Image (cartoon, rainbow, N blue to C red):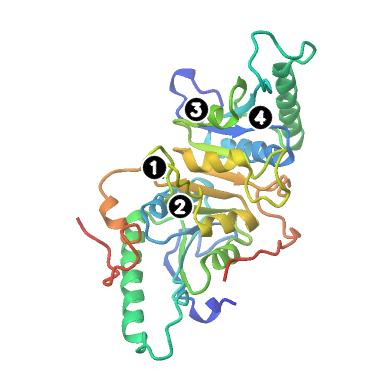
Amino acid sequence: MTDRAENDVQCPIRAGAEGPLAGSERITVGVDGSLASVAALRWALDEARCRKMRLHIVYVRNNKAVIPAHYAPSRDSHGVAHCAGQESALKSLIDEVLGSDAWPVVQVEFADGLPARVLLDCAAGAAMLVLGSSRSGGLDAAPVGKPRAPLGPVARDCLRAAPCPVVIVSSRVRQPEGDLAHAVWRSEGVGDDEGSVRRA
Amino acid sequence: MKVPSGERDHRIVVGVDGSVPSKAALAWAIRQARRTGAAVDAVIAWQVPLTVRTPWPLTWSTDFRSLAEHVLADAMADAAVRDSADHVEITPKVMEGNPVQVLLEDAAGADLLVIGNRGHGGFVEALLGSVGQQCVHHATCPVVVIRGSLASPADEPAAEHPGHPYMTPG
């Protein structure tokens, strides 16, 4: 069960000239702060501009992935701050990617739940679901004898059940230089206590 | 839209094998190309199914290349019937080789690589065919995976599309 209904933080960052959330056509993109997800966001942004659709950016917290032991100290003091740090970092990241253009209409959603399930719920009715894949291929991707699954579990589940076309953007897709340092908190390791975006 | 062959930066490569998902992928690619002004490469790969490499053809009566051409022409005619392909330059490419290799080589430098979620083989419930998996893994351009059930001309998923029960771990 997801309880994103209660926990949605929906903040339309900016409204387009033709009115906020005009039309129901949208492109859904899942972001997690990784380099590949930034590439996906960038691609989805271009696509939304091209198609004149609105862009629905979804970040799934999944802070219920780890259930603390009953004797563990309350995670609120740590977990909330952790999430808040990630969210503010993500917001600034999204702002940076979006730039200063007034369109497309962008809706950012921070949701709780299982990532694949939340993304699939969000993709219902969307023109496409855009995801990044950090598991880039190439000869150096996996050590010899240890093949990796080509997709992460979230992308895999989304591909299995998505009601719309799924676009997988690899982190190897060429993108403009200069902002790569802002996007690596997930790829550097989830256990980063600060939860902050590393700055160059 | 005619693009000079020298500067064909905007290409959408779509893999076609005649299966229903690949036809849906071709239709999606054509619609996308019309939006973005890109050209479409409809690629089909064929291989002589060799078990032992011999200097002479194993079967004299089978022309695999013309079979592949036929499949591709059929798929393109199907797409043209379903959705007019005017103003979109579609290049049929019949290439010999491993489908993954052929697709990736052609998709190098392309805008998009569009594939169906599965081809002729494999499990029905397999999430992504073997070619698609390798393409997703190795492609340097964004890969669009189209499910075969979305064959409706409208780009939007049909409202009556049955909600596939999906399971996520946990």
Question: Residue pushed farthest right?
Answer: B61
Q: Element under label 1?
A: loop
Query: Which kind of residue does numbered mark 1 sit on?
Result: Arg
Q: What is the distance, in whole Å, between disc 1 and disc 4 at their CAs? A: 33 Å
Q: Position of residue A56 (x, y in %)?
A: 50, 61
Q: Is residue B67 left or right of residue B42?
A: right
Callout 3 touching callout 4 (CB < 8 Å) = no
The subunit carrying tag 2 is A
Toward the left, the furthest residue is: A200
Q: Looking at the rendering, which quadrant does residue B16 occupy? A: top right
Residue position marked by numbered label 1 in the rendering? A172
At mark 2, the secondary structure is: strand
Q: Amino acid at mark 4?
A: Asp
Say few, some or many: other residues with alpha carbon within 10 Å of mark 2 (under 14 / 14 to 19 / 20 or more).
Answer: many
Residue B38 visible in image: no
Q: Which mark is residue B107?
A: none
- Badge nearest the viewer, 4 or 2: 2
Residue B49 picture location, percent across and down: 69, 23
Q: Are marks 1 and 3 on the same chain?
A: no
Q: Which residue is mark 3?
A: B105
Q: Are marks 4 and 2 in contact (CB under 8 Å)?
A: no
Q: Label 4: which residue?
A: B86
Marked residue chain, label 3: B
**What amino acid type is highlighted by mark number 3?**
Glu
Residue A101: give x, y in percent of width and height: 37, 54
Callouts 1 and 4 on one subunit: no
Q: Which residue is mark 2?
A: A132
Q: Chain of mark 4?
A: B
